[in-house]
Image (cartoon, rainbow, N blue to C red):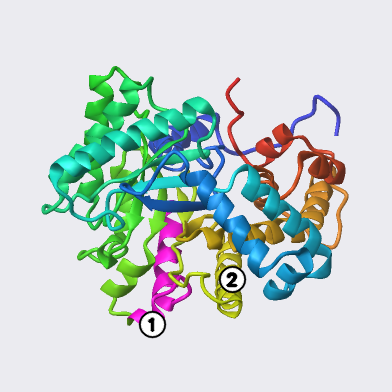
Amino acid sequence: MGQHETVATSLAPTVREEIGTALADVDADLARRYPGDPGTRQPVHTVYVPGDAVTAGTLREWGDAALAALDEHAPDAEAFAGVLGLPDDLAEPVYERVRAKLEREPVEDLRIDFEDGYGPRPDAEEDEAAARAAALVAGAFKDGTAAPYMGIRMKCMEAAVRDRGIRTLDIFLTGLMAAGGLPDGLVLTLPKVSYAEQVTAMARLLEAFEKTHALPDGRIGFEIQIETPQSILGADGRATVARMIEAAGGRATSLHYGTFDYSASCGVSAAHQAPDHPAADHAKAVMQVAAAGTGVRLSDGSTNVLPVGATARVHDAWRLHHGLVTRALARAYYQGWDMHPAHLPTRYAAVYAFYRGGLEQAAARLTAYVSKAGGDVLDEPATAKALSGYLLRGLDCGAVDPAEVARLTGLTRADLDALAGRPAPAA
């Protein structure tokens, strides 16, 4: 067919225009509700430390304690791989990267806890702890010792503790402003959310704070902690968690599954409260679907089996934790909670083995897709997006290096961002 020849059509241009007009509101709604990945780094875990126990040295202390656990219970790559069942080709690189991570950046996300880990205290005592938390967080970001993400978990919006939670949040944020402003890595967690109206209340609080300090609208986001059955399925039979994301007005950054509160509320006995219980799987599956495409991330919960005591007991706890983290990663729960420093070696071992073990295959599939070279798997744009996201998360946590990815794919970080549908990083 010649360059200027046209094919025959039957519909008048006005038909397309009318359909476009009819769907304009839908187009706008899709863009608002489902903006896609925010393009920021997601931490692989969150560490909770009570508000009265955190110090300027907490992050380093956790790293040192994790290294000491490795030295005592798995002093070399062969021993560690033997405990966890890592393949021979991953044993050395995973072990070396775990140790380097614990020395360089042992915690990716620290939450100073004023809820369950802190409990009820006299008002003056919690006031002082909240102010001290603000000073610690501000100081850490200023002197370069901060984790990539740091913040607090306040008390929830239930009537009995609502005023206390609001006051602690106010003291903390006000302290940060007085110390120079809100850091980019600030994270706030709202626990025990049961109704979307509680999320709306949190958004209103943050909006009021922003107006008081002349901050940009929407500057402060927050995590929603899913710990009650009512947050998954409401009395009206609808998925409450989807309504919560909407109620946040664009401020929701992630959904965190609370293993023990949720399980207990469902009647699960203490011995079976775990991230791999069917009740947990159902809750997280609903959370995952509700958050898909919204830019809201998902976090798994934790295990309360601590790697402490005799070596045999530590090894058992390590195998359990490693298995749970690996299982979560396969289900696209890329973040979780760690409750003890000795959980850090197996957190990073599972994460690094997940990304390093699949690196070459993911790189080969992505290269074939980009070059349209074909291969033994026919991938679509959505899968190419997922492959790019996989490589980006591996880069973010230190599991793989930019040079490795470039060598295997010929792609830059910017190329991967574009393929993953992430917005271009700010200049």
Is residue 427 part of the magenta span, yes or no? no
Residue 184 horizontal side relative to residue 67, left or right: left
Residue 274: name its quadrant.
bottom left
**Going 77% across and 35% down the picture, which residue do you hit?**
412
Please say if 56 is above or below 284: above
The image shows residue 189, relative to residue 324, as above or below, that is above
Quadrant showing the N terminus:
top right
Residue linked to disc 1 = 271
What amino acid is found at the position of numbered circle 2 in the picture? Trp
Disc 1 and disc 2: Cα gap in Å? Answer: 18 Å
Which quadrant would residue 208 be assigned to in this image?
A: top left
Instruction: In this rendered view, identify the residue nearer to me: 139 or 160.
Output: 139
- Residue range corresponding to the magenta coloring: 270-291
**Residue 367 percent location from the top left of the image:** 82, 47
Q: Label 1 sits on what residue type?
A: Ala
Secondary element at image label 1:
helix
Q: Going by the image, does 50 lie left or right of 375?
A: left
Query: Within the magenta stretch, is there residue 284?
Result: yes
**Is 375 displayed left or right of 14 in the figure?**
right
- The disc placed on residue 318 is 2
- In the picture, the quarter occupied by the C terminus is top right
Residue found at x 14% / y 43%: 123
Q: Is residue 155 visible?
A: yes
